[in-house]
Image (cartoon, helix red, strand yellow):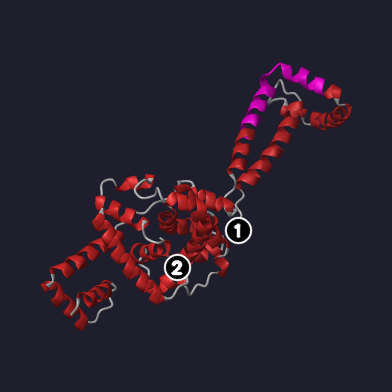
Amino acid sequence: MENEADLISSALEGDEDAYRGLLDIYKGRIFSFVYRIVRNYDDAEDITFGTFIRCFKSLSSFDRSRSFSTWLFSIAHNLTADFLRKNKQEYELLDERLPGKDDLVKEYEENEQLMRIEEALVNLPLIDREIVIFFYKEGKSYKEIGEILNIPVTTIKTRLHRARKKLRDLVREK
Amino acid sequence: MRHREIEILIQKSLDHATNREEERILRLHLSGCPACRQFYQELVQTEQALAGLIEFYPRQDFDDRVLRKLGLVTSLVWAKAAMVLIGAWFGSVLFLLFSPLTKGLFNRVLTSIPALVRLLDKAQLVLSSFSHILKPFAKNLNYSFPIIAFMFAILLVYFFGRTIKKEVVCRA
C-alpha cells in the first residue's frame, strides 16, 4: 500500500485510485469525529462529504511540511462549527434527547463500558468533546490539537484535565 | 502531600509529563491512599475506554459520490443513458431486420418529408453501388437500415465517449 505522501502526490496528478486511498484512510476517522459532535448520521455524512470536497479541491495549496491529518481535521472542525452555528436552534432542542437514544450507539449493546463512555461524551461541552476525541481516539498531541482548534496548548491541557475528570464522574454515576 | 496536589500529579502522569521524582512521589502516595488510588484507577479505565471507541462509517457509495462531485468519475446518469441506448439500438436492429412493417412504415415517414426523401434518394444511389457487397449478408436488406443504424452508432459513440471519459484534472 502506498504511503500517505505518495497518495497525496498521485492525487495531485489526478490519480483516482490515490483519492480512493486517501478516502479509505480517513473517511471513517473524519466521519466518527463529526458524528460524535453532531450526533446525527445524515448531517455527519454531509459534513464529512464537504470536508473531503474542500480538502481535495485545495489539495494543491496544502503545505506538505504539515501533517495531512491535522489539516484535514481542521477542515472538518471548521465545517462542523459552521454547521452547528447555522443550525444552533435545532441542535439545542435535539441535545435534550440525545444521550443513549441514538441508533448507532446500538453497536455498543455488547459493551456496556464503551456505551457509558459514548453517552458521557455527549454531556461534555463541544470543545472538550473535540479535545478528548483528538487526544484519545486520534492520538493527537496538544500542539496538533491546538493547530486544529486554533486555541493555546495551555487551554487544551486545562480543558482535557477537566474533561477527563468529568467523564470519570459521569461514567461512575451511570 | 495534599490530595489536590496528588490530583495534579495524577493528571500530569496521565499526560506522560511527570519526571522520575514526581512519579515516585505519586506511586508512594497511591500505595498508601485508597481514595486517590481509586481516583487514579478510574481515570485510567476511562482513558482505556476512550481509546477503544469504535469507528463509524458513512454509506457505502460515499467514495463514489465524492469522486463524482470532483469530476473524477462520470455521472451515473450518462452510464444509464448509454445502457438505454444500447438496448434501443439492439431493439431497432432486430426490428429493422425482421419486421415486415419496416418498409411500409419507413415509406410513410419519407412521403411526409420530401426533403428527406431527396436526401435518402442520393444516399440510396451511393449505397446501391455497394449493394453487391451488402446483398450476400442480408437478403431482405432495406436501405433504411444502414442509415438508421449509422445514426444510432453516432449517438452511441457520443454517449460512450461521455461515459468512459475520465477527467484527469479536477474540474473544480
> Does residue B31 appear in this view?
yes
Chain assignment, label 1:
B
Local SS, label 1: loop
Pair 1/2: label in front: 2
Residue at the image position 65 percent from the left and 46 percent from the top: B161
| Label 2 neighbour load within 10 Å: few <14, some 14-19, many 20+ | some
Please, what is the three-letter code of the amino acid marked with disc 1?
Cys
Q: Quadrant of residue A69?
A: bottom left
- Residue B96 inside the magenta-drawn segment: yes
Residue at the image position 49 percent from the left and 59 percent from the top: A80
Residue topped by disc 2: A70
Local SS, label 2: helix
Where is the N terminus of chain B found, in terms of image quarters?
A: bottom left
Which numbered tag is attached to residue B170? 1
> Does residue A46 appear in this view?
no
- Residue A152 inside the magenta-drawn segment: no
Q: Main secondary structure of the magenta part?
A: helix
Q: Residue furthest top?
A: B100
Residue A166 x/y as whole percent: 30, 63
